Structures are given as structure tokens and as C-alpha cells.
Amino acid sequence: MATAKDADRVRPALTLTKEELEVEVPEPRLNWMNQWREWGVRVRPGKKGLTLGSLNVGLYGEIPMNWPDRSRNPRGAIGVTGTPPVAIQIKDKVDLWAPCAADLYEEAIQRRWAPATDVDWKAIHPLPEDIERAICQVCTEICQYAIIDVEVITSWQHQMAYGYHEVKQFLATTSLDATRRHEAFRKRALVNGGGLGYEGPCQVSRLLLESSSGWTETVTGLILIRALFTQVMIRYLNRFAYNGVERKIYECVTQDFARLITYGVEHIKYALAHAPDKQGSILTTLAIGFRMFNRDLRDPVLREALAIVFGGGIAGARNEGMLVFYEMLDEYVQELLDACQYLRLPVTIEQLPRVFQKDQRHSADS
Amino acid sequence: MDQQTQNGAEFELDLGWMEKQGEWGTHAEPSKNGLTLADIQVGSYAETPEESRNLSGRPRGAVPRPGSMPIGNYTVRTKSEIWLENASFLYEEALQRQWSSATDIPWDTIEPLPDDVEQAQCQMATFLTEVEFVAGDVPSRWVSKTSPDFYEARNVLMAQVMDESRHMDVFRKRALVNGGGLMRATGATAGFVGGIDLARDFTEMSSRLHLSGEGAVLTIFRMGELMAYNDAEKAIYRLCAQDEARHVAFGVMHMRYMAANAPERREEIESYLDEAEAGMLTDAANPAGQLNQTSESLSIMLGGGRKYFDEGFRKLVSIRKRQLQEYQKRVTSAGFGDRFKNGRSRLGHMMANVAN
């Protein structure tokens, strides 16, 4: 065992003034000593280091279904009573929990990246103007999504009880991911002779920002509509990328989205398992969300810009590019339905607006 | 669509949006640090409005869409309320210096400590876990209220939220790694009037959080070598100090911008500083302050055990002085140094009573 004496030898000295050396030292009260709920904890690092999840041992791993304490007492510490509460509204585990949050948090940190230096910006080369304009328009809309994602997540984070710190910490990584996404796509728009484009429509964003009924409902829109769609879109953009700069951005962003979507799906699953009556509000949120999404999709800007990227220019956009766009939309719908099936949510393709239904789409277009 | 495909007809395109794009022909060039936020401040994209009328979450420089709904809940729409000149630099540095508490701390260097020292370490870790919560939640809340036209400042705050999350987790890890556990919370960040949570104005919040609160903690982290018993603890304090220095820099640089660009708010800011100074030694959020729970645990850590409490307390007094001196330097750098000459500041009085 290291002793205090040993420790003194390795710690640097602090030279005190004469005045400091003569300070009269008060008698310590030490009334904080021997005050704990569980002592003798010795978590050891595993092959992934000392992870957040590995700390959940003994009493420290007890995560109650309700956390009524509206102070910042760390879970497992002896709490303080009699202090004015802070603005915590989400106090039930069912309203925010996902069992994978601690693992996703550590993964987010391990997979951190910096758009400034992890992307080889010098490798970009001029593109035909129609393609550059289309890419810049897509970048503009992804930037806007990212801005809204940050606002959605940060407007909820401080309302979450401290007993569920794993979720709060994971959400800190997701809002930084969204910040970085905004940064990366803004940089792409401004690096290759282009610029930012036209502001995107805002109905889905409005749903996300104004969904004040609950975090689970917000997650439903944020993940099953916005994030899942954006992830599929980025996967297609990667397939049709024009250079390594874009490919690198898409790959990094896809990883970030995968964690966000995992949290969201697992949270909804947890919520439904522990509060089946939430199914109604989740389905209603989805129904409203799809109406909003339908309105956004009626706007031709993103659709046409993507078709130009996929079709290799305006000429190709009119046939091949637009077909790829609809293929992408179908893939999104399939992933959404798969997620709903996993969550045992009774959502069928017939319930979605016609633009999402392959065989009904022409009547929606007409 | 299918009908169109079956007929072999081409899709009609509108393409009107191609005429509605922001400044065109932008060639941002990477610098020696890669393509940084500073490097993309070119042409009109570098222009930040004094008053933001962007209420729909539009990226700065994009062409507004007529009829966009004001969906953003932005109360911070004036540049001077949030701005600082070096935000791009602080953000890029934050991304470059992200670290992992799981793998960048040499946890295996921790060996059992005498019980009194372990208790002191665990009490301090409990306290730091608690205060790092507030330092993450409050900036996060302000980001959602700030116009994206000031995205550079928002980005720094988001990086701070991430940093604080990591600080919270590294101190929890420290408490649970060496045969100890969490101890008693302090309630230091409860919803008191004048607390960080309740500030209605961003600059008011920043003066409490960045300048006085985190400034005091930064001094402690910088002195971490004095209270670290192994390489793991040294690494924790060193890495946290690096992060905390950026947060404090945000506060100083924001206040400097505010002083230069909103002179009509000077007196108001002096009032925030009055309040901050009044609480510097008495406020429970300062780990070296007068709350016995934290000051005694620090004294034990600094002294080398309960037996050397007196020696540790004298070092604590020295650290308190440093906190006050460093605070004075920051406030002076922010453009409010006159208060130390014209008698407004109580710092001199506090310096004389630092041992109480």
C-alpha cells in the first residue's frame, strides 16, 4: 500500500510564503468522513479500459424506475435535502432509458473525429456546375437538419434526472455529433467553388422542436423520421460520392447516426416494454410526423438536388437520378417498417402517405 | 411515378432553386491545421449579423425561404449577447483535444491509499461529479436558445457540454476504482437565486459559470499535481485543466467582446462581477472555498493525510490566493480591470481574509 509519506515524496512541493506558513489553522470538523452508502468498491479496467457501464456495480448499479430527487446528487452518493430544486421534469426511467446508453457513450468517444483534420480537403477537385450546385443544396439541408437536431436534444437534456446520467452523457455526444455534422457539411459546401443553397422546408423540424409532450415522442420523430431518413440518404450519397472528401464525411457521419438511431430505437423499445400505454402516443406522433414529412417532400428542392447527384447531372436527374431517389425513399420506408416490426408497433405501409408507397406514388404525384 | 417510368417518360424538374443560392464561387482553403472554421470565414459567409432575424434554423449564408415558420426558440438574437472573437479557434482546439476517460487515463497506476486520503479523494470526486453536471446542462440549455447565425459560439458551448460530461464520468470513475465510493453530495449547484441555473441572461450565466465558477475549479485542476497520488490522478487533473481552460477562455473573451461592443451594459456586468466576487470564497461551488466538506478533503489531499492537515490547510490558503489572483487577471483581460483600482472590487479585502 502506498502511504501518505510515500506520496509526499512523489508530489511536488508548493513553496509557501512566511505569511502562509503562519496561518492559524482551524480545527477540522471532519463530519463528512465515513459518510457513504457503499464503500470498498474497486472496479478494474477491462479490455476497453475503464468504461462507464463497468461502474454499475453493487449499489452504484441500482438504477431505480423513478428518481424523484430534483437536485444534482450523483447516483449512489448521500443526497442533500432542503435545497431548492433545479428544473428537472423527466424523473421516470421509462421516459428516457435505453440499456445501451453507457456503451454508446464510450463508443462515441472512441470514434471521435475532426472534420478539420480527418478529411483530406486538398483531395477535392472541381465538379460540373450542376453537380456542385446540387451537392451544395444537399449540404445546406443537412446543415439545417443538424442545427435543429442540436436544438431538439439540448432543449431536453437539462430536464433529465441525474439518476440516469448514462443517458444524459450519451446525449452530450449526440449533440456534439450533430454540431460536427453541421460543421462538416458547411465546410464541404464552401470548399469547392460553391456556396450554401436555399433554405429547406421546416415541417418535420417544427414537429421535433414543438414536440413538448415528452422525450419519448420527440425521440420517435427524431429517430424514426429524421435520423433514419438522413442516414439512408447519406448512405446513398456515399454510393454516389464524387471524391474521397465526400466519402470520408459520409462514412464518419454514418457511424454517428448509427449510435443515435440505436439509442432511439432501444429507448422506444424500453418504453414500450415498461409502459405499453405509450404505444398510442408513439403511433400518433408517427402519424403526425409522416404528414409533416409528406409536406416537406412535396417541396421539389431536395428531391431534385439528390436526383442530380445520383444521376450525374441535370440530364441524368430526369430519369436515372429520380429513379434512384425513389429507390432511396423505398429503402427508407423498408427500414422504418423493419424498425416498427422490431418495436412491435402496428405500422403498415398502407398507413403512410401515398408518396411513401411505391405502388401508390403516381397518384400522389398527380 | 411508376406510371411515368412505365411510360418511359422523363421526370419534370423545376430547378428554380438553382437560382436561389447564397454567394457562389467560394473556395475555402485548408490551412496548416486542416480546414478549420476560421478558414471557411470567406466572403459573405464570414458576416455575422449584429441582430439575427433567422428564426427557422437556417444555416447562416443560406437563402431564406419565404414563408418559413419561426420554429426556433431563440432568445439570444443579438451578437453581443453571445459572441467572442476566438470561438472558431476554441472549437477546433476542443475537437482536437477530445480524450477518453476509459482509455487515456492509466488506471492501473492507482494503488490502495491510506483510508483518510482515499476518503478525501472520494469526497472531492463526489463534489466534482456534482458540479460538472451543472456545467454541462446549463450551456446546453442556452445553445437551444441561441440563433444559429452565431453557430461558432454555439459550437464551443456544445464542445463544453461534451467536456463536462467526460469530467463527470472521470470523477465518478475515480471514486469507484480504488476501494472507495461516492460520499456526500454538497447541494452546491441547487436552484439558489444568483445561481448558474437561474440566470436569465447569457452573459450573467457566463460570468457565474465560466469566469468565477470554472475559473476557481481551473486553479484547482492546475494544482492537481499537488494532490495527485499516482499517474492516473495526475492525468485526470491535467486533462481536465486543459478543457477547463477553454471554458474559462470562452467567458473571458465573451465578456471582452461585450465590454467593447455593448458599453451600455457595462454597469450591469459590473453587478454580475460584484455578485461573483461576493461568493468566491463562501460559495459551495468553489472546492477551495469555506465549505468544510470540500476544504477539509482538499487539505487532507494537499497535506498527505489527516495527520498533516495543518500543512495541507496552509497550502489550501495559498491556492485560494491564486484563485483570487487568477480571477483578477481574467477580469482585467476581459476589460473590467478598473474595478480593482477604483475600490469597487472586494478582492483586496478577500485576499486579506483568505485564511478564514
Image: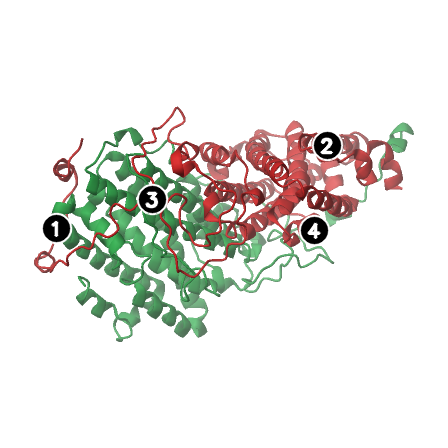
* Secondary structure of the residue carrying numbered label 2: helix
| Tag nearer the camera, 2 or 3 | 2
In the picture, the disc for residue A202 is 4
In the picture, the disc for residue A337 is 2
- CA distance for labels 2 and 4: 24 Å
| Tag nearer the camera, 2 or 4 | 2
In the picture, the disc for residue B240 is 3
Task: Tell which of A142 and B162 is nearer to you.
Answer: B162
Q: Residues within 10 Å of mark 4 (few under 14, many from 20)?
A: many
What amino acid does circle 2 point to? Leu
Q: Can residue A129 be seen in this view?
A: yes
User: Badge 3 sits on which subunit?
Assistant: B
User: Badge 2 sits on which subunit?
Assistant: A
Check the rendered structure and report the hue given to chain B: green
User: Badge 4 sits on which subunit?
Assistant: A
A236 in relation to A19, above or below? above
